Image (cartoon, grey):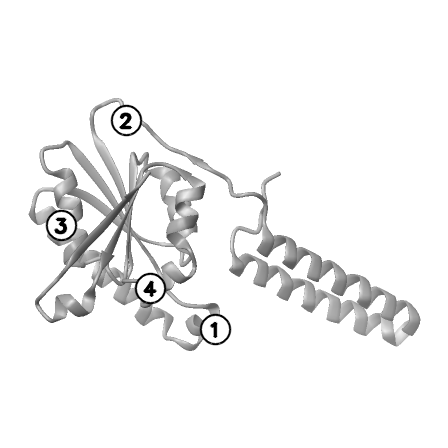
Amino acid sequence: MHNPLRSEADVFRLVVVIGVAAALVVALTLITRPVFGILLAALLVGTGVGLAYRGTRGAEPRRVAGHHAEDGTRRILVVANQTAAGRELLHEITNRCRGNDCEVMLVCPGMVGSRAERWASDVDKGMDAARERMDRSVAALRGVGVEVRAEVGDPDPNMAIEDALRVFPADEIVISTLPPGESRWLEHDVVERTRREVDLPMTHVIVDLDAAQASSPSRSATSIT
């Protein structure tokens, strides 16, 4: 059975709706029948907790089937945010497309961090920054002859990947992150979840922005199949 709660945000919204409805129903019931109101409150709270637990726990990971191009075109789905315009990532894509008929789709999840951090931040600025990095990456890739399209995706990188695969028949995935210890995506197991849930070859590229700013970029790519 498909779990309609696709992400933490969906679970949160469901719990809020249940909470508001419960508060209204219980308030009215307590005014008329206090005992019945207490029982109803307990039932609604239990239902909300159960749904939240089910949503966060989720079903078993759904593996997304890969696509196999029959026209000889190599289609690469690239997922990056802060590192979208990183030199290491651009080199990785350019090298993969060199000598091949290649199409690239770049997806930049809209925001990073926890929900609380997103609430505390300026969402518009975050989206603008993601688009700016995305545009720089697209311009650089097109400048070396790589055909690429791009979009800002779901804030959850794994959801962004799933959404992209519905419209882009990728043959492989490239995920770009900051180094371990700096990357929230690595802290949240984005790369490992993709490896478990998506039936496609995957490459993890590490972009060291600090090294790039110091004019001594290092390139690290680990192939995962």
Report if the CB atoms under discs 2 and 3 are less than 8 Å apart: no
Q: Disc 2 and disc 1: Cα gap in Å?
A: 41 Å
Residue type pointed to by label 3: His
| Residue depicted at x 64% and y 57% | 53
The quarter of the rendered structure image containing the N terminus is top right
- Disc sitting over residue 183 in the figure: 4
Residue type pointed to by label 1: Ala
Q: Disc 4 and disc 1: Cα gap in Å?
A: 18 Å
Q: Which residue is mark 2?
A: 69
Task: Say what secondary structure mark 2 lies in.
Answer: loop
**Camera-side mark, 2 or 3:** 3
Dot 3: few (<14), some (14–19), or many (≥20) neighbours within 10 Å? few
Q: Is residue 9 above or below residue 171?
A: below
- Disc sitting over residue 116 in the figure: 1
Task: Say what secondary structure mark 1 lies in.
Answer: helix
Task: Say what secondary structure mark 4 lies in.
Answer: loop
**Camera-side mark, 2 or 4:** 4
Report if the CB atoms under discs 3 and 1 are less than 8 Å apart: no
- Disc sitting over residue 211 in the figure: none
Q: Disc 2 and disc 3: Cα gap in Å?
A: 23 Å
Residue type pointed to by label 2: Ala
Residue 207's x, y, as percent? 22, 59
Report if the CB atoms under discs 2 and 4 are less than 8 Å apart: no
